[in-house]
Amino acid sequence: MSLMIKGQLVDDWLESEQEAGEFVRKDSVFRNWVTADGSAGPSGEGGFAAEPGRYHLYVSYACPWAHRTLIFRKLKGLEDVISYSVVHPDMGPEGWKFDDSFADATADDLYGQDFMHQLYTRADANYEGIVTVPVLWDKQRQTIVNNESAEIIRMLNSAFNAHARHPELDFFPQDLRSDIETINEPIYETLNNGVYRCGFATTQAAYEEAFDALFETLDMIEARLDKQRYLTGARITEADWRLFPTLVRFDAVYYSHFKCNQRRIEDYPNLSNYLRELYQWPGVAETVFMHHIKRHYYWSHDSINPTRIVPKGPALDFNRPHDRERLPRED
């Protein structure tokens, strides 16, 4: 992620820290909604109707937040409805860039721009703020609809049902919404974002506080998954797909690079089997690009890894059998 201040781009990782050495993530700025008919969304914003071919995702295969949107695009069967472009995994002084010389990265398929920040200023010439992925872009109005992954996946879950191959799938069902919101909050604070709070802490106290909270949450999830198949019970939901991108990156990156080294996911019997079930869900493995994931973290964060050496390991086999069939599943 990069920061623009009065037209100047600077690295934003350390700019996101408080004096106590704690990493604090800045909020997303573009918060409009696509709805089935263009009416107002949950935030009161509307006017963006769900239409095939109108919207485009800008993503990084390395970024867990962007990964969420690719999972929902795949699961809902929106591949022919929403196109996407993939940034290069290396993040330099100007932030996310487009360069298709790295395997599976693409050019900017819409405008041929070199950097993501150029798309932000295309949407708002006066924009001064963080430049993140994912971005949901409206080709018709040539602007950013939304750059908050938690909101984009809810749009993909329901707004495009008239055009989706799998409109019957609902990962935010009405009867489980309270349970989903309840489990989402601590997992986001202490785990999804908690790994970053460990990795970018600049004081021992801030690091240890984040570290302890992270593993308390992993222990809580491990115990929960001993009694039920998914986070909210027998049905797989948004909560599971929000957790998956963090889990799939954990042993390869967060354990060592972000010093989250009390235990690996592989050391948790229930979590490791659960991770493999989700990875083996039809279409999901196609959204995981470990060469982008490892390259981005180990190369881009030179304050943590100044040599930029990308480790060859660990050997990970997410296709191994899992034991989750021992618990009931409700489709």
Image: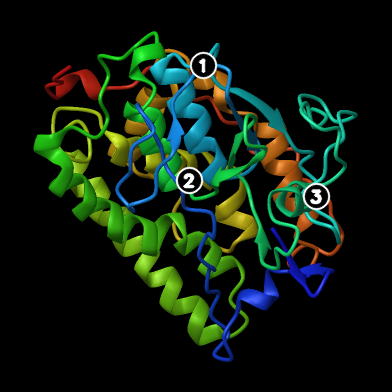
**Residue nearest the observer in this picture, 185 or 270:** 185
Q: CA distance from mark 2 to mark 1?
A: 20 Å
* Image disc number at residue 52: 1
> Is 219 placed above or below 327 here?
below
> How many C-alpha atoms fall within 10 Å of the one at disc 2: few (<14), some, or many (≥20)?
many
The mark tally for this picture is 3
Residue 131 in the image, given as x and y percentages of width and height: 68, 57
Which quarter of the figure is the N terminus placed in? bottom right
* Image disc number at residue 191: none
Amino acid type of the residue tagged 1 in the rendering: Pro
Horizontal relation, residue 99 to residue 87: left or right:
right
Residue beneath label 3, please? 118
Horizontal relation, residue 266 to residue 182: left or right:
right
Residue 125 in the image, given as x and y percentages of width and height: 75, 58
Amino acid type of the residue tagged 3 in the rendering: Gln
Q: Secondary structure at mark 2?
A: helix
- Res 280 quadrant in image: top left
Q: Earlier in the sequence, mark 1 or mark 3?
A: 1
Q: Earlier in the sequence, mark 2 or mark 1?
A: 1
Which quarter of the figure is the C terminus placed in? top left
Which tag is nearer the camera, tag 2 or tag 1? 1
Looking at this view, name the residue that lies furthest to the bottom. Answer: 19
Q: Secondary structure at mark 3?
A: helix
Q: CA distance from mark 3 to mark 2?
A: 20 Å
Amino acid type of the residue tagged 2 in the rendering: Ser
> What residue do we see at 63% from left, 36% from top?
141
Residue 186 in the image, given as x and y percentages of width and height: 29, 60
* Residue 64 visible somewhere in the drawing: no
Residue beneath label 2, please? 149
